Amino acid sequence: MRHPISSMFALAAILAPIAGAVAQETNRAPVHAPQPMMPPGPGPQQPGRYTLVDRELSVLDSEGKPTSLGSLTLLFDSATGEVSYLVREGGAVAWRVIPRPPHHHQPGPPTTPWTQPHFAPPGSAPYLPSGPPTPVPSSLPAAPLPPLPMPTPASPSPFTQGPGAGPRAPIANPLVDTAGFRDSVAEADRLRAQRRVGEAAFLALATPESVILDCRSRESFARLHVRGAVNLPFPDITAEELARLIPSPDTRVLIYCNNNFAAAPTAFPEKVARAALNHHAFATLVAYGYRNVFELAPLVDVASTEIPLEGDDAP
């Protein structure tokens, strides 16, 4: 059998918030310690039965006056772990048992009692138990958590569809052409096979009639760039901006990127090789109708390259 005070304390901790939120109390002091209680009607007092709540309850009406709800009395039986409440049936008074939860554990082996009461009298210092805490009985079963119910949407989600619904119809957007993008990448790959050049060829092609296009950010361009290059950050590329910088679709355009210059990580931060800006810039120029494009191929050191550089961080 579990120790009565310990069992009562566990149940009191569960029921105290429920009883305290029922209504406003009137004319009776709170119960601070478990008290043995005589069950209603004739008969001897039964040991191991304790009063958890014994209070008069009332609420305020619309005019602010208290209206009595009667009394609330809860009785705990430490031998069975049951909690009873007092009711009136006709002219008699009787106890009704509150059903225990389905996972309520059965009484386990006795545990070491604490040497002090669980409830401190009013005005006393907070209670701290002496010695080690009461161990959890080994017979306490682990109550499995019930599975969470899956919500049922009121209408089908635009992002999911049930099995057997068939292929989803594509969402139309005249400003997004995925097939055209793939075609531009494929054509750019064919051109790049013949248009990737070394330092010497890059310098020879950089005539006054050519345009050296730098698609990095304005901040990186200001730090360091190829002398004579013009800057058009990749997100700002439009047909109008390209036409402003490149005289015609037949004009020779020279491009380079972060991954062409080493030893300058602030001005030329290295990109992942498969996401180098060279790929994007070349394919984008092809998509806009510019095919006379040449790309600087090697990775060169900013301190030793023959390609002239200028900017705030120029060596």
Image (cartoon, rainbow, N blue to C red):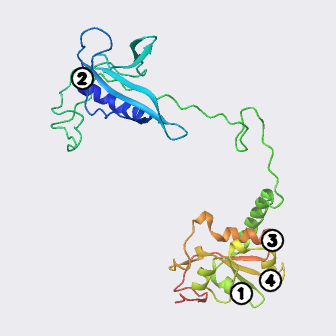
- The residue carrying mark 4 is 244
| Residue at the image point whose x is 76% and y is 72% from the top | 285
Where is residue 89? Give x, y as percent. 45, 12
- Image spot of residue 190 (x, y percent): 75, 66
Residue where numbered disc 1 is placed: 206
Q: Is residue 28 visible?
A: yes
**First in residue order: circle 3 vs circle 1:** 1
Q: Which mark is residue 288?
A: 3
Q: Can you tell which mark lies on residue 161? A: none
- Quarter of the image for the N terminus: give it: top left
User: Where's residue 313, x and y in %?
Assistant: 53, 87
Residue 159 coordinates in the image, percent (x, y): 70, 44
Badge 2 density bin: few <14, some 14–19, many ≥20, Cα 10 Å: some
- Tag 3 and tag 2, C-beta contact below 8 Å: no
**Residue type at tag 3:** Tyr
Q: Nearer the viewer, residue 13 or 221?
A: 13
* Helix, strand or loop under label 1: loop
Residue kind at label 4, given as amino acid type: Arg
Image: 204 above or below 161: below
Tag 4 and tag 2, C-beta contact below 8 Å = no
Q: Circle 2 sits on which residue? A: 4
User: What's under tag 1, amino acid-wise?
Assistant: Ala
10 Å crowding of disc 1: few (<14), some (14-19), many (20+) = some
Rendering quarter of residue 279: bottom right
- Disc number lying in front (3 or 1): 3
The quarter holding residue 130 reads top left
Q: CA distance from mark 4 to mark 3?
A: 13 Å
x 35%, y 21%: residue: 105
Distance between the Cα atoms at labels 2 and 1?
A: 95 Å
Mark 4 or 2: in front is: 2
Q: Secondary structure at mark 2?
A: helix
